[in-house]
Amino acid sequence: MSQESNPSAATGGAQVLDGKATAAAVRSDVAAGVEALVSGGGRQPGLTVVLVGDDPASQVYVRSKDRAATEAGFRVETVRMPADSAQADVEATVRRLNDEDAVDGILVQLPLPRGLDSDAVTELIDPAKDVDGLTKDNIARLVLGQDGLVPCTPAGCIEICDRHGISLAGKDVVVIGRSHLVGKPFAQLALARNATVTVCHSRTRDLEAHCRAADVVVAAVGVTELVKGSWIKEGAVVLDVGINRGEDGKLRGDVDFEGARERASAITPVPGGVGPMTIAMLLANTLETSRRRQGRG
């Protein structure tokens, strides 16, 4: 029996899709791609992160990105700007990076401090260097089914499915959440894989009924254990994108993991599921942009 027809590898419960191991495999592939690019006469890929302010979570995340990119063989730079930076100064930084040939990927760490227009800053990024996939150009390419750069978290969800033999073709997929970071782009990616997609949100009536009918449930709303285990159809695949910290300090997802794993065929845990894939796909996007910009893609 193929892994696609029966993705469960655990007796008496769902296969737990290990995002850490999957992300490590992606990073290994990226590192090999960087080595091949450089050994073939190409230039070392360059990633620059713009970090405005001193938000603790952003600081931790940027350090993780820097470390992963360095390990993959990238040239890595973090441009640190004070929290009281003017809009014009942040925009000028992005324009400067657009013009630097050694910079293949530009990532403006969000959220920006209060008073700064994140959308305006993001839209200034050269679409060819938009490794977060958030510019209107790349969003349009995603909707139109054209080659472009895809937001990292939904791309990571697709990568987890691909590397575990889980096909979306012909499946009824329910996406809970309509953010431009996860919900909407994942819906477009699933449509491109020939899934039938329903996007649910805060105004959806009878969310439980939608989940019960789904072959694949993608939860990305940031509400702790919103999706109950009893809502999951037998044999469904569950991708939990939520990361919520409880009063006890522990991280939990948007899905009741223990309840859902008794019914699902495959499920991502929190932590250790989709989360690690975000940085891995950022590296994959940066390598792709570098190859294209050097005429080696």
Image (cartoon, rainbow, N blue to C red):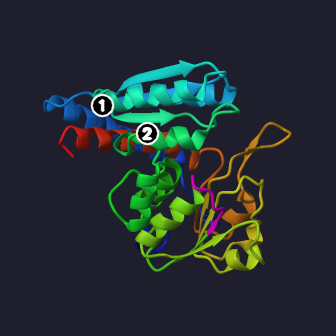
Q: Is residue 107 above or below residue 252?
A: above
Q: Is residue 176 magenta?
A: yes
- Res 26 visible: yes
- Taking the image as shown, residue 212 lies to the left or right of residue 185, namely right
Q: Is 150 located above or below residue 186 in the figure? A: above
Which quadrant of the structure image shows residue 38?
Answer: top left
Q: Which residue is mark 2?
A: 125
- Give percent across and percent down for residue 45: 30, 31
Our reading of the magenta stretch's main secondary structure is loop
On the image, the x and y values in percent for residue 105 come to: 38, 35
Choose the circle earlier in sequence order: 2 or 1: 1
The range drawn in magenta is: 175-181
Q: Is residue 9 left or right of residue 246?
A: left
Identify the residue position indicated by label 1 in the image.
45
Residue found at x 27% / y 34%:
34
State the residue lying farthest toward the right: 247
